[in-house]
Amino acid sequence: MVDYAMDIHKSLYHTEDVPQDMIERRAEVVARLKALEEGAAPLVAFLQNANTVQELRADKQYCLQMLNDRFQVCNCNLCFSNG
């Protein structure tokens, strides 16, 4: 979305330059995206394996413990905040 805003700015002002705050915001967004991807990586790896997904049960506590023990997926990987 930030890249889109930068493209609109370039188009409106017929320039390749963008305001510094847009450049800084883009860096923040990219850093946040990378952090979220890294945090979600264990869960994504688990979900991509059909055999391990079949091991899930209706018991929430069992699932959370199994995910934590075998795949290092903890509650911190399951809750992403907007801040």
Image: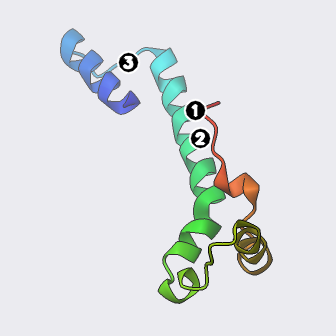
Image side of residue 57 versus residue 76, left or right = left
**In the picture shown, does residue 22 fall above or below 44?**
above
In which quarter of the view is residue 4 placed? top left
**In the picture shown, does residue 79 fall above or below 44?**
above
Say whether disc 2 or disc 3 marks the residue closer to the N-terminus: 3
Say whether disc 1 or disc 3 marks the residue closer to the N-terminus: 3
Residue under circle 3? Answer: 18
Q: Give amino acid for label 1.
A: Glu
Mark 3: which secondary structure? loop
Q: Residues within 10 Å of mark 2 (few under 14, many from 20)?
A: few
Q: Give amino acid for label 2.
A: Arg
Q: CA distance from mark 2 to mark 1?
A: 6 Å
Q: What residue is drawn where x is 48% and y is 25%?
A: 23
Q: Position of residue 72 (x, y in %)?
A: 75, 71
For the N terminus, give its image quadrant: top left
Q: Give amino acid for label 3.
A: Val
Image side of residue 11 versus residue 63, left or right = left
